[in-house]
Image: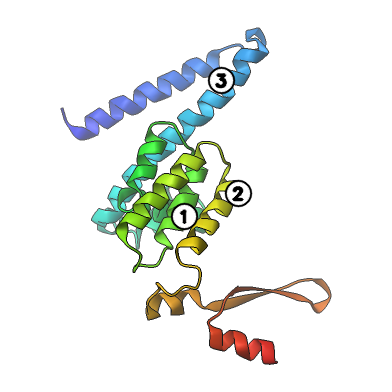
Amino acid sequence: MDSTRALSEALTLVRDAVAVLRSEDLHGVDSGSLLTDVVAMRRLADQVEGEWLRRVGEVHARGAAQVVGAGSTKAFLRGTCLISPSESSRAVDTASALRTTCTQTADAVAAGVIGIGQAQVIAKVITGLPSALPEDVRVAGEATLVAHAAALNPAELAWAGRYFACHVDPHGVARDDAEQRARSGITFASTLYGAGIARGDLDPESLAVICAA
């Protein structure tokens, strides 16, 4: 069977199922069933988005967006799916990670064990680890975060991820020079009345300069 045809049939089945749900009179559904539906449908939505990300990852790996004239996969998503620049960037970054370095996370999303929000957090943590860290540390760390993701929301999981990253490389010594430079930097944002907020990571020399100012 032609792969395009198979995809069309699969999407038709999904759309038909949504139409059936849409036709249901919710006034006749008891509250307990509605609560169960809310949780189950959230998981299904995450599974569908996980499958969408799997395809985005394949599109990005092939450079398929450029073939049809888009400047990049992110530009293609912005123009066709009408999502914001930040959303398209996050989608491509997450999709690429799930396709390569975070396959345990991809499997958990596909199985409905964790949500897309948790998957995005795990992908960011794992891809942000120093390249010099042993592969078994990465794999074990991802497995631990996936296990925690089944019980933590994305914000809570992000704290766990930061703890893990600091634990495996507390002083950043595992990062090579290029990674250190990429992480070093500071951004400023203005607030009311001329005040401002500074955020970022600094190398020891830059920190010493600021502290001495």
Instruction: Name the amino acid, label 2.
Output: Ala
Instruction: Tell me if I can see residue 78 in this picture.
Output: no
Looking at the image, residue 92 lies above or below residue 205 = above
- Tell me where residue 32 sits by quadrant: top right
Residue wearing tag 1: 90
For residue 23, side relative to residue 109 (left or right): right
Q: CA distance from mark 3 to mark 1?
A: 28 Å
The quarter of the picture where the N terminus appears is top left
Task: State which tag comes first along the sequence, 3 or 2.
Answer: 3
List x then y, in percent, for residue 71: 35, 63
Report which residue position mark 3 lands on. 37
Q: Residue at x 54, y 14 (%)?
A: 23
Among the 4 quarters of the image, the one containing residue 180: bottom left
Q: Earlier in the sequence, mark 3 or mark 1?
A: 3
User: Please, is residue 166 above or below residue 105 in the view?
Assistant: below
Mark 3 neighbour class, 10 Å CA radius: few under 14, some 14 to 19, many 20 or more: few
Q: Residue at x 46, y 28 (%)?
A: 44
Q: Position of residue 6 (x, y in %)?
A: 24, 28
Cα distance between the residues tagged 3 and 2: 24 Å
**Which colour assignment does the render follow?**
rainbow
Q: Nearer the viewer, residue 69 or 183?
A: 183
Q: Is residue 88 left or right of residue 68?
A: right
Query: Which marked residue is nearer to the observer: mark 2 or mark 1?
Result: 2
Q: Which residue is mark 2?
A: 155
- How crowded pointer 2 is (Cα within 10 Å; few <14, some 14-19, many 20+) is rated as few
Q: Looking at the image, is mark 2 or mark 1 earlier in the sequence?
A: 1
Amino acid type at mark 3: Asp
